[in-house]
Image: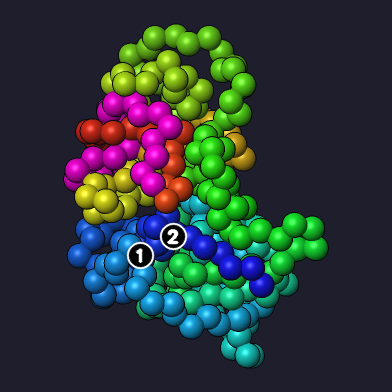
């Protein structure tokens, strides 16, 4: 097994899993479902025990993976940040966060019990085993080569597919493509809310899509941040905010493009 070090990004990701609903305010662990406990420290003060199980089923959702695993003859569900896991792998994970009667709107499924793991071990590969941090590009010195919250920048030398055009309203794909030209500008976008994560780093994180972009290149989702918000998953909105490029929050928590100081109008 190879240790999957997630540091603050992973803890934020695990927090992203954790409210009674995906948009419940962060009086409880935030970002995907529900257990009545307070938000833990972003950096753990002690190492939790690791449990090992075989992966039986995988359900990807919004940059995460829900794993049905078998541990000593007992089947359970574990949620982790997106990682190269396949059916049949034997993984290790912590059980610090147990969610009961958790409903995922992204999957349209309710789980009687599910663990949201922040410490995860992946099986070593025959060629060059890596930690999850390295697999996600977070261990590289060049932050432009990293991935943050599932977002991956385009290669340095890649030019936009289309010349930049000033517009009153942009698509998700256009903001990704023209991010350098739009840096520091206020943009408007009409789309649907995929997910809202409340109270992380003193702001709300609203994931918006409009049907444009490339899922494999991770350009079909754009994050808007605001001190607070009232929108919820499924809302059709007009979002407005300031474009920030190559935003590095530390600990590998990196965005090639993110929209800050955002406001939202429900259509």
Q: Give the mark, 1 or 2, whose residue is nearer the N terminus.
A: 2
User: Badge 1 local density, few (<14 within 10 Å), some, or many (20+)?
Assistant: few
Residue where numbered disc 2 is placed: 7
* Callout 1–callout 2 Cβ contact below 8 Å: yes
222 sits to left or right of 84: left
Q: Residue furthest front?
A: 141
The residue under the point 39% across, 18% down is 182
| Residue at 37% from the left image edge and 12% from the top image edge | 167
Q: Residue at x 29, y 26 (%)?
A: 242
Q: Quick check: 131 above or below 162?
A: below
Q: Quadrant of the N terminus?
A: bottom right
CA–CA distance in space, label 1 to label 2: 7 Å
Residue 40 location in percent, x, y? 29, 69
Q: How many marks?
A: 2
* Residue 78: percent from left, percent from top: 52, 72
Residue nearest the observer in this picture, 140 or 150: 140
Q: Residue furthest right?
A: 126
- Nearest the viewer among 151 and 17 is 151
In the structure shown, which secondary structural element does the residue marked by tag 2 occupy?
Answer: helix
Q: Which mark is drawn over residue 118? A: none
Q: In this rendering, would 173 be left or right of 236? A: right
Q: Is residue 223 visible?
A: yes
Q: Is residue 243 magenta?
A: yes
Q: Quadrant of residue 170?
A: top left
Question: What x and y, as percent, mark residue 52?
Answer: 60, 81
Residue at (32% x, 52% y) in the render: 197
Q: Please tell me which residue lies in front, 185 or 58.
A: 185
Q: Quadrant of the C terminus?
A: top left
Residue 107 in view here: no
Answer whether residue 107 is magenta in the image. Answer: no
Q: Which residues are magenta?
A: 224-250
**Residue at label 1?**
43
């Amino acid at each position: 097994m190879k240790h999957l070090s997630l540091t603050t990004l992973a803890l934020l990701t695990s927090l992203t899993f954790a409210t009674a609903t995906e948009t419940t305010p962060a009086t409880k662990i935030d970002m995907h479902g529900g257990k009545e406990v307070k938000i833990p420290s972003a950096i753990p003060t002690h190492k939790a025990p690791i449990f090992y199980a075989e992966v039986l089923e995988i359900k990807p959702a919004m940059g995460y993976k829900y794993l049905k695993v078998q541990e000593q003859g007992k089947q359970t569900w574990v949620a982790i940040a997106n990682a190269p896991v396949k059916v049949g792998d034997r993984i290790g994970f912590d059980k610090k966060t147990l969610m009961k009667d958790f409903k995922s709107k992204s999957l349209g499924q309710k789980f009687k019990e599910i663990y949201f793991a922040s410490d995860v071990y992946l099986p070593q590969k025959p060629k060059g085993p890596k930690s999850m941090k390295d697999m996600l590009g977070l261990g590289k010195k060049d932050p432009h080569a990293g991935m943050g919250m599932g977002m991956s920048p385009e290669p340095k030398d890649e030019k936009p597919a289309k010349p930049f055009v000033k517009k009153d309203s942009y698509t998700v794909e256009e903001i990704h493509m023209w991010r350098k030209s739009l840096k520091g500008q206020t943009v408007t976008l009409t789309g649907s809310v995929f997910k809202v994560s409340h109270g992380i780093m003193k702001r709300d994180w609203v994931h918006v899509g409009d049907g444009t972009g490339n899922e494999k290149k991770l350009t079909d989702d754009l994050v808007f941040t605001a001190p607070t918000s009232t929108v919820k998953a499924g809302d059709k909105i007009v979002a407005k905010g300031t474009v920030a490029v190559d935003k590095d929050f530390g600990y590998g928590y990196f965005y090639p493009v993110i929209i800050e100081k955002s406001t939202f109008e429900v259509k």
